[in-house]
Image (cartoon, rainbow, N blue to C red):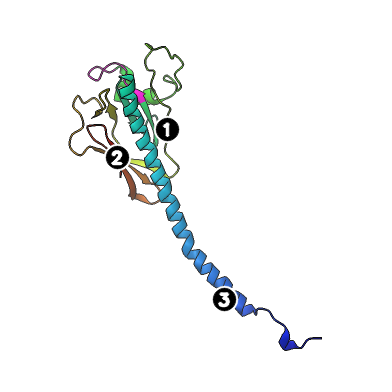
């Protein structure tokens, strides 16, 4: 038989102190992890938009066709790269702003193209893209990429001037102050900031 002084273990008070310390450390770590996760989601959404713009520019040069990227089209938080029908000066009816939802939608202009014949335009439309959850556009403008690689605002015959056009996505849960910017200049350079 052992004496009462030889029994080893933790007292209830010691266990409560350890549990309290673990709770405090976890309470400090969870907000940091949540914030980092939201920032990563926002950065990923901005990269996705940047890639779509770069793809549109490359496709315009490769296909020798004007490519347009429309935002919040056909619905809020969606965007699509479409081949301009007609010309910049006289676009087809479906490329007008009033028909943007038709042009962006998959109903009349499906992706992939059901008529891949070379002369049956459009042949270069992309799929409708959707922003990630809790991310939205705060500033957007329709961008046209011409076959020479230059970027124009929709319908303009001169390239974008100055430092370029800035598009923004933001974290819906944190407000527009937490955002990422994508800049497109007249030479067609797309920069994520």
- Of the residues tagged 2 and 1, which is closer to the observer? 2
**SS under mark 2:** strand
Q: Which secondary structure, mark 1?
A: strand
Residue at disc 3, secondary structure = helix
Q: Which mark is residue 164?
A: none
Residue under the point 43% across and 14% down: 116
Would you say residue 149 sits in the magenta stretch?
A: no
- Which region of the structure is painted magenta? 82-91
> Going by the image, does 25 lie left or right of 93?
right
* Residue at mark 3: 17
Give the labeled residue for mark 1.
Answer: 129
Magenta segment, prevailing SS (helix, strand or loop): loop
Q: Closer to the observer: label 2 or label 3?
A: 2
- The tag earlier along the polypeptide, 2 or 3, is 3
* Chain-order first, disc 2 or disc 1: 1
Q: Is residue 71 visible?
A: no
Q: Is residue 17 above or below residue 33?
A: below
Residue positioned 36% across, 45% down in the render: 170
Between 140 and 5, the one lying in front of the other is 5
Give residue 61's position: percent from left, percent from top.
30, 23
Q: Quadrant of residue 49?
A: top left
Crowdedness near tag 1: few (<14), some (14–19) or many (≥20) residues, C-alpha within 10 Å:
some
Q: Is residue 156 visible?
A: yes
Q: Percent position (x, y) of residue 99?
A: 34, 23
User: Residue at point 45% right, 51% down?
Assistant: 37
Mark 2 to mark 3 CA distance (whole Å): 51 Å
Residue at the spot of label 2: 191
Crowd tier of the residue under label 2, counting other residues whose Cα lies within 10 Å: few below 14, some 14–19, many 20 or above: some
């Amino acid at each position: 038989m052992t004496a009462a002084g030889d029994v080893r273990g933790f007292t209830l008070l010691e266990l409560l102190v350890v549990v309290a310390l673990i709770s405090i450390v976890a309470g400090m770590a969870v907000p940091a992890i949540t914030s980092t996760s939201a920032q990563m989601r926002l950065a990923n959404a901005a990269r996705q938009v940047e890639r779509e713009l770069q793809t549109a520019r490359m496709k315009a040069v490769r296909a020798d066709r004007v490519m347009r990227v429309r935002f919040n089209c056909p619905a809020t938080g969606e965007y699509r790269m479409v081949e301009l029908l007609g010309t910049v000066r006289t676009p087809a009816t479906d490329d007008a702003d009033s028909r943007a939802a038709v042009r962006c939608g998959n109903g009349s202009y499906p992706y992939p193209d059901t008529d891949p014949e070379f002369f049956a335009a459009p042949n270069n439309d992309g799929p409708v893209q959707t922003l990630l959850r809790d991310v939205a556009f705060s500033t957007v403008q329709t961008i046209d990429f011409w076959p020479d690689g230059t970027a124009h605002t929709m319908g303009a015959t001169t390239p974008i001037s100055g430092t370029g056009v800035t598009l923004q996505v933001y974290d819906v849960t944190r407000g527009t102050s937490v955002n990422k910017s994508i800049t497109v200049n007249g030479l067609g350079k797309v920069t994520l900031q």
